[in-house]
Amino acid sequence: MVSSMIKNVIFDIGMVLINFRYREYMEDLGFSMEVQEIFCKNIIENKLWGDLDLGVRPEKEVICEMKSRVSEYPAEADVFFDRINDIVETFPYALSWIQGLKKKGYRVYLLSNYPKKLFALHAKEKFTFADAVDGRIVSGYVKMVKPDPEIYKLLCMTYDLKPEECVFLDDREDNLKSAQTLGFHTIRFQNYEQAKEELELLLQESGSAEETDSDKKRVLGERLPEKIFGIDHYAISVSDSEKSRKFYEKLGFHVVKDYQAEDGSVRILQMENDGFLLEMFCYPDSDPTPDFVETLNRDLHVNGAKHMALAVEDPKKAAEYLLKEGLIEEMPAINEGRLGRPYFFIKDPDGIFVEIITC
């Protein structure tokens, strides 16, 4: 019997929602069996593919090394990577399976080892389910791979998930074992019929997400209004993403997502601090912070966003820490707020105000 209610279903992608059809793909390209074996050994089933999944090395560098390992087949190597969009196909059940779960009240996420550039291509061209899920963690973007426990922790932290309320479906036993050690329910995917049946049984034992929500409302009656909206993030634009990252790291934030456009047009960082998500946009041609921001935090009669606020137990100690870390040049005046909470302000590298307030 499942001891806690399952609210979230997490899918691996490869060989669960999509067919990684690399053999058929090479047959479509007209490769002989001999060439297929050479490409499998030196590209697909090689550590280098794992390097693409991890995303630490530049993809162009890894692909260049892959091609060097099959240097006797330069034409085949070129066509292999030129047409690589066709190396996968979405299983016909993928979208309807996810949609069915969501209709029953479950949230659905993806957790996959996948090269960054290839994922972006396939999400656009091949995945019918890409926009149907509630969230995803993809190895090439976060520079971690399964079965590293940290990538599971990142999923939970990013989407505020509790492992005991999640079931994870993957075709690899080593990936499932890591999830199990963290408290996830798991199902080894062998085929759609088998996995769907096991999932339905597990969810039945856990209790319906819809039934649980309605039961809570029935018990609490009018005291529990229906929740429609929840806090997600606070967004700012910055001129230097690395400079801002270091600044906010000293305020207790850590990076949970790091997106960089292939053409260098934008970098988006998401940083988290005790459930507070800060999203930063950085464009190479960004404009400076407008002059009115300099007084906006104090001019409360002017409509507009004023500042973000971080809670501290002792504002004086917080100010001493900021001074020591070089984030401020002198001790600030600690003011008594009209609502009875001492506070002071600092500015980030772009002049955006951050209020430090007593919790």
Image (cartoon, helix red, strand yellow):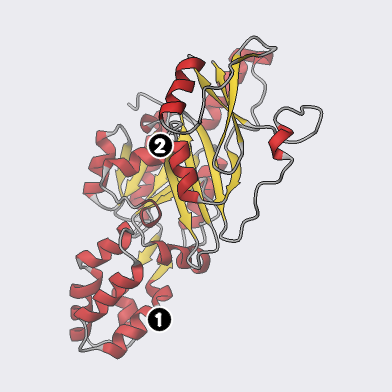
Question: Taking 253 as reference, is 30 left or right?
Answer: left
Q: Which mark is residue 82?
A: 1
Q: CA distance from mark 1 to mark 2?
A: 36 Å
Q: Is residue 183 visible?
A: yes
- SS for tag 1? helix
- Up the image or down, 254 lies above or below 341; here it is below
Q: Position of residue 229 (x, y in %)?
A: 64, 33
Kindly give the residue lying farthest to the front in the view shown.
330
Seen at 35% across and 38% down, the residue is 153
Q: Is residue 8 visible?
A: no
Tell me how many marks there are.
2
The dot on residue 156 is 2
Q: Which mark sits nearer the N-terminus, 1 or 2?
A: 1
Quadrant that contains the N terminus: top left
Say which quarter of the image contains residue 5.
Answer: top left
Label 2 residue SS: helix
x and y, in percent, of residue 170 in the image? 31, 50
Residue 17 is situated, as x and y percent measured from the top left of the image, at 41, 57
Label 1 is placed on what type of residue?
Asp
Residue drawn at (41%, 67%), measured in percent from left and top?
A: 118
Q: Residues within 10 Å of mark 1 (few under 14, many from 20)?
A: few
Residue at the location (29% across, 33% down)? 182
Give residue 72's position: percent from left, percent from top. 20, 89
Give the camera-side residue of 144 and 221: 144
- For label 2, count other residues whose C-alpha is less than 10 Å away and answer few (under 14), some (14-19) or many (20+): some
The residue located at (25%, 52%) in the rendering is 172
Q: Quadrant of residue 232?
A: top right
Give the quadrant of the C terminus: top right
